[in-house]
């Protein structure tokens, strides 16, 4: 039987989030709905999840000494990584010392960069993937380009939200893609990259996969549009044949099981390419996925609520999908520490529409600051309505 106490007392159940972005913010809200005391960490002050957490700490989470000090001080019952840039070796040590890491420290370590998970999927599990090479020097990058051929995708093995990712179709784009990959990595020195052949897929999906105390559950597949590796719109459910969906679910269960075994708990965002009836593994994140923001309007239990139920060992007897739904990001470009959003009454004038503004304290360049959400009679109608919500928002710097 699961037990949750009272925050700020000796019976409190404490959860510590490593990463406090917009996805973490929704996780905090769901945790607090169930009476969990929440501590949020990030590298900058007033990050979105910090604004709703019970307390927060600013630190470099890649610093093992600083990370360990905060965790030992707070003594949480749950450590919930929400970003890739964490000292994962420290999480492994802490787990061995008795702390609980979600889903497991091993899963967090393997997925902190694209190298670990790609090797697991392609070599250990034998799943279909694109042809790929890793490169940690400029010359090895050029060798990888020769081996893979045009067109190809290059991205840092450790980055988020599409930073540093390029599709290269011409020889003239090879050098700029290397430079961009170096700017987008999360390490100070030369960033290792993955160079992979471009699969001519029919469509791509995110399959949200939940590992919980009673087994494995799946949300309906989510389709999405990306630009420069960053999602712009997503929709649910994406139409698929029954056979292809079953193949996708089998791959998702294989990958998540290999990552954390029978004891890991939580939601995973499994990215897959579909070509005809063939399903290719792309990536997996052991946490809520940005394309899954659509579930805030498409399901009775959002991906964040499902994540929290799973990690608290609560049952997930069913997931109700409300019909064709979509999300569209609010992605302005600017430079400000006091951004304002207006025209919101017009943005939300249509029935079955919602919005989230993330409350990010700073924008420098292009940054995802919110999302429009909608339901419709069809996917196309939902997409049009979600985009209308996002487009109507006026951003002032």
Image (tube, helix red, strand yellow):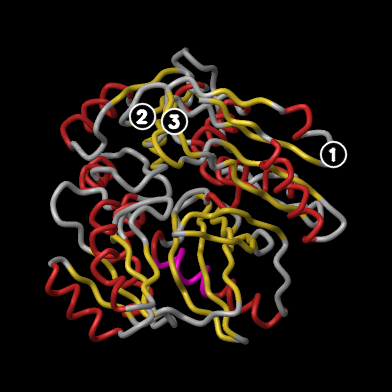
Tell me how far mark 3 sits from mark 2, CA to CA: 11 Å
Mark 1, residue position: 350
Of tags 3 and 2, which is closer to the observer?
Answer: 2
Kindly report which numbered mark, 1 or 3, lies closer to the viewer in this rendering. 1
Residue at the farthest top position: 9
Residue 195 lies in the magenta stretch: no
Residue at numbered disc 2: 41
Q: Which residues are magenta?
A: 251-258
- The x and y percentages for residue 337 are 43, 22
Percent position (x, y) of residue 167? 40, 70
Labels 1 and 3: the sequence-earlier one: 3
Report how far apart the C-alphas of labels 1 and 3 lie in the structure. Answer: 37 Å
x then y, percent, for residue 34: 61, 28
Q: Residue at x 70, y 75 (%)?
A: 240
Relative depth, front residue between 10 and 144: 144
The secondary structure that most of the magenta stretch takes on is helix
Please state which of residues 177 and 313 is positioned toward the viewer in this rendering: 177
Q: Circle 3 is placed at which residue position?
A: 15
């Amino acid at each position: 039987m699961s037990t949750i106490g009272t925050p700020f007392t000796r019976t409190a159940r404490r959860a510590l989030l490593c990463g406090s972005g917009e996805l973490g913010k929704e996780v905090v809200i769901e945790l607090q709905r169930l009476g969990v005391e929440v501590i949020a960490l990030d590298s900058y002050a007033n990050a979105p999840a910090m604004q709703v957490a019970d307390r927060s700490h600013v630190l470099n989470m890649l610093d093992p000494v600083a990370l360990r000090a905060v965790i030992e001080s707070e003594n949480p019952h749950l450590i919930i990584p929400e970003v890739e840039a964490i000292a994962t070796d420290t999480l492994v040590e802490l787990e061995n010392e008795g702390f609980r890491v979600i889903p497991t420290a091993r899963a967090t370590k393997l997925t902190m960069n694209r190298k670990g998970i790609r090797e697991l999927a392609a070599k250990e599990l034998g799943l279909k993937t694109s042809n790929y090479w890793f490169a940690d020097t400029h010359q090895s990058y050029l060798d990888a380009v020769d081996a893979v051929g045009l067109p190809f995708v290059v991205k840092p093995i450790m980055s988020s939200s599409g930073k540093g990712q390029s599709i290269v179709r011409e020889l003239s784009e090879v050098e700029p893609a290397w430079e961009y990959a170096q700017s987008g990595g999360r390490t100070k020195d030369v960033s290792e990259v993955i160079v992979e052949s471009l699969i001519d897929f029919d469509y791509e999906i995110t399959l949200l996969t939940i590992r919980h105390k009673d087994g494995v559950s799946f949300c309906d597949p989510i389709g999405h549009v990306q630009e420069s590796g960053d999602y712009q719109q997503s929709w649910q459910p994406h139409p698929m044949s029954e056979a292809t969906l079953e193949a996708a679910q089998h791959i998702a269960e294989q990958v998540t099981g290999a990552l954390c075994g029978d004891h890991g708990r939580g939601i995973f965002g499994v990215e897959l390419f579909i070509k005809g009836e063939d399903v290719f593994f792309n990536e997996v994140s052991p946490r809520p996925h940005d394309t899954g923001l659509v579930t805030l309007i498409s399901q009775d239990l959002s991906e964040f609520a499902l994540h929290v139920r799973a990690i608290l060992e609560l049952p997930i007897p069913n997931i109700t999908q409300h019909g064709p739904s979509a999300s569209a990001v609010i992605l302005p470009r600017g430079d400000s520490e006091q951004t304002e959003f207006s025209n919101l009454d017009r943005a939300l004038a249509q029935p079955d529409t919602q919005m989230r503004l993330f409350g990010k304290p700073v924008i420098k360049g292009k940054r995802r600051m919110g999302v429009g959400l909608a339901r419709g009679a069809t996917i196309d109608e939902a997409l049009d309505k979600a985009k209308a919500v996002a487009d109507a928002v006026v951003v002032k710097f």
